[in-house]
């Protein structure tokens, strides 16, 4: 397969993806939504992030781990507490990595 063909496909997919996403956003940016709809929409990013994180914590690499042998689960609990307490994303990330490494070493 020629590299120009591959790059043409990548560019076409990028253009199609951009078009499909941009047009609805451009149209909806001009609309004024009721407060209840705005409030409802504000929960979407948090819900998506929670679904992604919980899936990876409970099933790392697509495999279920027993809760007492899951370093991701043990690290997620204090990490969540740190974020809840201080609301600092960088600090929370560092704490999460350190807790994960510590629990990984303890659990083998």
Image: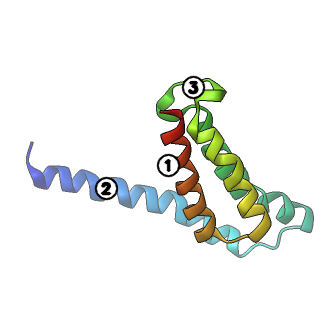
Q: Residue at x 66, y 43 (%)?
A: 51
Q: Residue at x 15, y 50 (%)?
A: 5
Residue 76 on image: x %, y %: 65, 47
Q: Is residue 64 above or below residue 42?
A: above
Question: What is the quadrant of the N terminus in the image?
Answer: top left
Q: Residue at x 65, y 28 (%)?
A: 68
In the image shown, does 87 or 32 lie closer to the viewer? Answer: 87
Residue 103 on image: x %, y %: 56, 42
Residue identified by numbered label 1: 101
The crowd level at tag 1 (other Cα within 10 Å; few <14, some 14-19, many 20+) is: some
Q: CA distance from mark 3 to mark 1?
A: 17 Å
Q: CA distance from mark 1 to mark 2?
A: 42 Å
- Contact (CB < 8 A) between labels 3 and 1? no
Q: Nearer the viewer, mark 2 or mark 3?
A: 3
Residue identified by numbered label 2: 12
Q: Which numbered disc, 2 or 3, marks the residue that appears first in the sequence? A: 2
Q: Secondary structure at mark 2?
A: helix
The crowd level at tag 3 (other Cα within 10 Å; few <14, some 14-19, many 20+) is: some
Q: Which numbered disc, 1 or 2, marks the residue that appears first in the sequence? A: 2
Residue 92 on image: x %, y %: 63, 64
Q: CA distance from mark 2 to mark 3?
A: 40 Å
The answer to whether 101 appears left or right of 26 in the picture is left
Q: In the orientation shown, which residue stands out farthest toward the front?
A: 106
Residue 82: image tag: none
Q: Secondary structure at mark 3?
A: loop
- Contact (CB < 8 A) between labels 1 and 2? no
Residue identified by numbered label 3: 65
The crowd level at tag 2 (other Cα within 10 Å; few <14, some 14-19, many 20+) is: few
């Amino acid at each position: 397969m020629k590299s120009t063909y591959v790059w043409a496909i990548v560019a076409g997919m990028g253009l199609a993806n951009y078009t499909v996403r941009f047009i609805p956003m451009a149209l909806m940016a001009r609309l004024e939504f009721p407060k209840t709809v705005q409030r409802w929409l504000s929960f979407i990013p948090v819900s998506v992030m929670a679904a992604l994180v919980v899936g990876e914590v409970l099933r790392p690499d697509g495999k279920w781990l027993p809760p007492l042998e899951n370093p991701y689960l043990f690290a997620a609990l204090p990490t969540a507490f740190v974020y809840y307490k201080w609301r600092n994303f960088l600090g929370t990330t560092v704490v999460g990595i350190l807790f994960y490494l510590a629990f990984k070493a303890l659990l083998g």
